[in-house]
Amino acid sequence: MLNSDGHAKNHSLFIDPDGAQLTPLYDASSLIPFLGPSGLDEESVRQRAGARVLSMRYGASFEAGEIGGFEIGAIGRRCGVPSADLVAETAGRCLALPGIISDLADELPSHLQTDVVARFVEWMPVRADQAIEALVPHL
């Protein structure tokens, strides 16, 4: 999603006697609709998305274009989750996200259906494809 505010304090756990679960996602934002003016071609969107610096490091990089299956797999290994499982789960979420964003945008009241929302809906599939391509060699 290119969430530039996705630092660790935005992720929490519910801990109870039965174990731990992730809390609901909050403070989720995306730079995708702010990659540039409307009318950008797909290659420009891909280049701008790949060059974005994130607030959390994945592996050795903060740059979105340098994050792929190896880095996601390393997170799995450190957490005791099979790398291939985490990479596959991440790819599945990347596949689903454009449809979710589009459906949510369709549900917005008309006064919130802005150019920013339209760019998010238009460019999310481009970013999702880019992320999936980075994961694919590791699936």
Image (cartoon, helix red, strand yellow):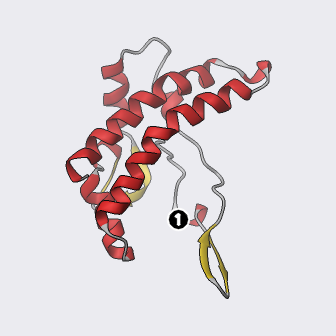
Mark 1: give few (<14), some (14-19) or many (20+) Cα within 10 Å. Answer: few
Could you tell me residue 19's position as x and y percent? 60, 82
Residue 114 x %, y %: 67, 19
What amino acid is found at the position of numbered circle 1 in the picture?
Answer: Ala
Q: Quadrant of residue 47?
A: top left
Query: For this view, does 106 lie left or right of residue 75?
Result: right
Where is 131 relative to 68, above or below?
above
Identified at 36% across, 77% down, the residue is: 80
The residue positioned farthest toward the left in the image shown: 137
Q: Count every numbered label the image shows and give the total.
A: 1
Q: Is residue 16 above or below residue 6?
A: below
- Location of residue 126 in the rendering, given as x and y in whole percent from the top left corner: 39, 28
- Residue farthest to the bottom, as pictured: 17
Q: Kindly identify which residue carries mark 1.
A: 8
Direction from residue 130 to residue 120 in the image, left or right = right
Q: Tell me what residue is drawn at x 30 percent, y 50 percent.
A: 67
Residue at image position (27%, 53%) is 69
Can residue 50 be seen at all in this image of the molecule? no
Residue at 49%, 39% (x, y): give it: 96
Looking at the image, which is closer to me, 44 or 84? 84
**Depth check, front residue: 44 or 129:** 129
Q: Is residue 106 above or below residue 11?
A: above
Element type at marker 1?
Answer: helix
The answer to whether residue 105 is seen in the rendering is yes
